[in-house]
Image (cartoon, rainbow, N blue to C red):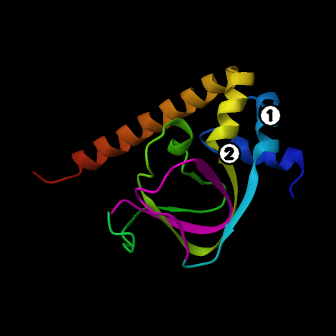
Amino acid sequence: MQPLFDRIILLKRVPFFALLRTDQLRHIVPKLEPAGWASGECVFEKGDPSDCMYILLSGRVGVALNDDPNSTEYVALLGPGDCFGEMGLLDDLPRSATVHVLETAEALSLSREHLHGMLLAYPELGIGMLAALSLRLREANEAWSKSRADMPG
């Protein structure tokens, strides 16, 4: 198990938590649970129930949006320090993608139940998370706009 300080530093690098203060992150660290998968496993499939997010400590995963769970057409390749599944913390909708393990991976998970409890106890956590999500959406919009501008026609 990583010491408290190491986990706080890790969370500061995760976009979903990057705008939270260190004193706020110390409330999240105890709620993180270990998870792991072997190469070739599927973490979850598009349409599965969504109840937690993951922060990769090691290994690599591929994110596929295709409805075919066996698709290896990845829209993102993620490695240590990256997170996935965070939308599952905020809504009750099914998973929007399939995540395949490309290299044996270790991660920390945070459940929706734990996050909701922390937000009720420490509402200021929500402000930082909303700001981080807004920033990620702006970056995605900018990337999409650039890709459209590069298209012929």
Q: Residue furthest left?
A: 153
Q: Amino acid at mark 1?
A: His
Q: Main secondary structure of the magenta part?
A: strand
Q: Which residue is mark 1?
A: 27
Q: Which residue is mark 2?
A: 13
* The quadrant where residue 36 appears: bottom right
Q: Residue at x 51, y 49 (%)?
A: 50
Q: How much space separates mark 1 and mark 2, taking CA atoms? A: 16 Å
Q: 68 left or right of 90?
A: left
Q: Residue at x 69, y 20 (%)?
A: 124
Q: Position of residue 60 (x, y in %)?
A: 59, 68
Mark 1: which secondary structure?
helix
Q: Amino acid at mark 2?
A: Arg
Q: Is residue 114 visible?
A: yes
Other-residue count near label 2 (Cα within 10 Å), few / some / many at <14 / 14–19 / ≥20: some
**51 magenta-colored:** yes
* The quadrant where residue 28 appears: top right
Q: Residue at x 36, y 72 (%)?
A: 71
Residue 95 drawn above or below residue 130: below
Q: Position of residue 139 (x, y in %)?
A: 44, 39
Q: Residue at x 72, y 30 (%)?
A: 118
Front label number (1 vs 2): 1
Residue 15 drawn above or below residue 36: above
In the image, the segment drawn in magenta is 41-66
Q: Quadrant of the N terminus?
A: bottom right
Mark 2: which secondary structure?
helix
Viewer-nearest residue: 74 or 145: 74
